[in-house]
Image (tube, rainbow, N blue to C red):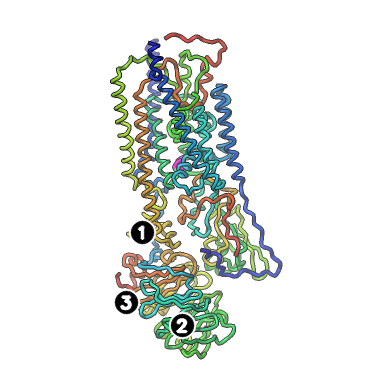
Amino acid sequence: MKSNDDKKMTRRGFLKAGGSALIGIAVAGFAGRSVWKMLTDPDALFYGRGSDSKRKPSGTGEKVSPYRMTGAFEVPDMISAMEVMPDGHIVIAMPGSVCIYSASGSLTENFAVRSDIRDVAVYRDRIYLLYADRIEIYGKHGEELGGWQACSEDADYCSFTVFSGGVFVTDASAKNICKYNLDGTLARFINSPNGFVVPSYSFGITNIGGKVFCSNPGRHVVEQYDDDGSFIASFGESGAGAGQFCGCCNPVQLTGNNAGELLTSEKGIPRISCYSLNGSFRSILLDTAALGGGHEAYDMRVCSDRLIVAGRGRVSIFQYDDRRAAQTLCGSCTVPCPMKVTA
Amino acid sequence: MDKKKEEKGLSSPMERREFLRKCGTLLAGGSLAAIGGVLGSRAKAAGGDTMWQIDPELCIRCGRCQTECVLPVSAVKCFHANQVCGYCDLCGGYYRANVKELNTAAENMLCPTGAITRRFVEEPYFEYTINEDLCNGCGKCVNGCSSFGNGSLFLQIQQELCLNCNECSISKVCVSNAIQRVPVSSAYKLKDKA
Amino acid sequence: MNTFLIARFPKPDFTSGYQYPEIVHGLPYETFWSWMDVAVLIIMLSIAAWAVHKRRSRGVLFTESVISVLYFGFYRSGCVCSVGSIQNVVLALNDSSYNLPLAVLLLFLLPLVFALFFGRVFCAGVCPMGALQEIVNVRNFRLSRAVTNALGFIPWIYLAFAVMYAATRSQFIICRFDPFIGIFRMGGDIGMIVFGVILLLMSVFMGRPFCQFLCPYGALLGLVSRVSVRKVEVTAKECINCTLCHNACPVDAIRPPHANRPEETRMTGVKRILLYLVILPLLTVGGALLMQSRSEVLAGANKDVRLMRMLNEYDAAPDEGMTAEVEAFYEMGRSIDELTVRVDATMLSFRHWSLIAGGIIGLALGCRLIRLSVKRTRKTYEIERAACVACGKCFNYCPQNKSKIKYEPQNL
């Protein structure tokens, strides 16, 4: 009898010891694991597996920009338009004033103007300002040099380009291009053979190599004319992917780079893309994140090896970056581009 | 022996322990009172309870509102600020991007659950409404509206569904720190007037 | 930055008399319910204190447990609870810009104030987590004292980390690791729900595993109840050393009597005190410095620090792609200078608070070691104040509570 009792006691004792060990290991194990994780890798413990949330760039390199921001400065007001002078100074048109900055961002000139500036252009050391119903010309230091009224009372001008071939102004209400001679006399109207579709104030125009390039925003194409107004060609297609124009009216802004290629700036999904003059898509140069977000289109100009972008109260300077470009179409492009100077 | 102990007064272990315990009680009581006083006066000045809200200016519609809420269907819903809406036919939040035909075919819809309905008002205006029972807080319509429209659609926490957790599990991973606590008196951050 | 108010498409001019719909967004009566919580808390704490000290009724406490699980647990979804309120209070003490609602402050203070007067009556039947474990408990399997003592240290580690992470505004880890909240609100992180179910299964066989081994608020309540004005007594009458209460206690808080120790010399006592005076500061400072050496890694739990790390990783290897946080950072046009200022402030805060957290752990460890080595003379069965959760199981076992006949104590 006594031996049976002994066995019972040891079995209970064994159960107690075993149970204690089990529960002790379970609780201490959980607590210990948590403490260990907190002391070594809290990110994985609190936020899940960190490496899973990284995004790999897609094959077309849409998510990585080949350009890197190398400088930026704030401006005091909303930016209506931007232009770069041949000597590298940056002209910023804001509601009610025009500021001229040096390339490093220090203010050199500042003069007051009317508040509804639509666009700004620089030609032969003169600053041309475009309003909805007139064009005004100023000298480099703000001295008034003249200007002229729009040819029609219903004119609602969006943007313009000034070069030796004349002053080409896009009109959002008449949905055409007004060509003026440099002395202000009206030369002719330019209509698109496809018809301009202009749903909103996005009607960009520029000149490259003596030819005029403008957007037909509702049709998502870029059209090319020569300086007497005859249509040459057009390219472009609708879509949200790289090499396409998204939303209702894009591209908003156009400019040329010093390799003779065309740069477009879009709104909605802001991005700056590069095309050849006959319409082959080269690469996205700056995507939404690199530009600084938002939905408005950014104004951009090329100056030697720098890409200058203006928007959201800030002027940013971007330069080509080998490492980033390696993953993009820009890196594999064979066009001899002066911007691809390694910084 | 007993007399000696009585004479020694506080030197017996029991009474020493009692004395230490009384000191401890006073210390603990004092600390609790101090904490209560400091924080209580501050709490009275600050005002009452707070609730979680998304700041529509900061939200970039990363999509985590749909997946991170502790509730099976997220408490984050799409709200419509009608006063800001343009009532357009080609609605950036209703139709998917680059839609070819403006009809109600399923492949043209942006909303994955069909929570946006529209009603013809007058030429050329349409009124868009969100059915909150179907909305899952994915933010696709908000993205479309903000990119191509007036931005009248926005994501916001529906307070009748929200459990008001001590630490909102979406706010922990919100990429733009848009979810913060706001006082109950201004408990809804809305995109009200145009 | 009212960019969203710039209407790309103009406001429509309705000619048919269309009226904008009036949309009213509903607000729950949050203020009312949080004050209701405080009121219910006060009432239940008072009833528990009365039931433990005056009536010695386990039935009342069990009923309170059921009510607590139903109201605080399922109806109010278990949030905000007194356990989590530690974090809010610590954050408010450290950061004067943090808005701490008065109701949350009371949720933190009231159980502690009651503990100061009456012992851990909060744990008795008011805390929903303790109540849940109490309701499912059937058997009383007790662990060996060694394991209980070792595991009983975990709440202090938990408390130290919770304080550090709350004060630096990084994480509310008590909320993150709450095992029962998933059951109460019927949704949430699946891992914690599984852990909660495991704890409940353990609670069927043994008493209150969460309260004994994990609850950080229990550590504070235990500390305060050590110096409570009134002590929980098994019976109002004299103890007759029948052992029944010791066997009944689920948390092993009732200590059996010890044989009288021989009187020790004064020198031994002095030497012991000196040893304690050396060990305690050594452990405290050692713990503090050890934690501080890891403060940079610990800071990785903070959102800003994590973002900075991601930005640096992206800058170093842009071809690996950006995370959603980096993308949002650039899209919002935030400046890295502003982030650097915040991250520097956070790292400094972590250096201070890791010191405090390590000090708490070191101090708690030292005190625990000292307490374990002290043997007290006891003639009868006594409740150890800090460990007793006032569940009242012992009341029904003690024969002195049942019988009208007064038993005379046996002379051992």
The amino acid on which the numbered mark 1 sits, given as a three-letter code, is: Tyr
* Secondary structure type for disc 3: loop
The structure residue drawn at horizontal position 35% and vertical position 79%, both measured from the top left corner, is A87
Answer above or below: position of A298 versus C157: below
Give the alpha-carbon distance from disc 3 to disc 1, as whole Å: 29 Å
The image's mark for residue A128 is 2
The quadrant in which residue C382 appears is top left
Residue B135 x/y as whole percent: 57, 54
Mark 3–mark 2 Cα distance, whole angstroms, equals: 32 Å
Expressed as whole percent of the image width and height from the top left, the position of residue B151 reads 55, 64
Proximity of marks 3 and 1: CB atoms separated by less than 8 Å: no
Q: Chain of mark 3?
A: A
Vertical order, B160 against C405 (above or below): below
Q: Furthest residue to the front?
A: B7
Q: Answer with the quarter of the image where residue A38 lies.
A: top left
Q: Earlier in the sequence, mark 3 or mark 2?
A: 2
Quarter of the image with the C terminus of chain C in it = top left
Q: Nearer the viewer, residue B128 or A242?
A: B128
Q: Which residue is at 37% across, 26% downward?
A: C371
**Amino acid on which the number 3 mark rests in the picture:** Pro
Q: Which residue is mark 3?
A: A336
Mark 2 burial class by Cα count in 10 Å: few <14, some 14-19, many 20+? many
Q: Report whether residue A11 is seen.
A: no
Q: CA distance from mark 1 to mark 2?
A: 42 Å
Q: Start and end of the magenta stretch?
A: C173-177
Q: Is residue C175 magenta?
A: yes
Residue A261 on image: x %, y %? 39, 78
Few, some or many C-alpha atoms within 10 Å of disc 1 (few <14, some 14-19, many ≥20)? Answer: some
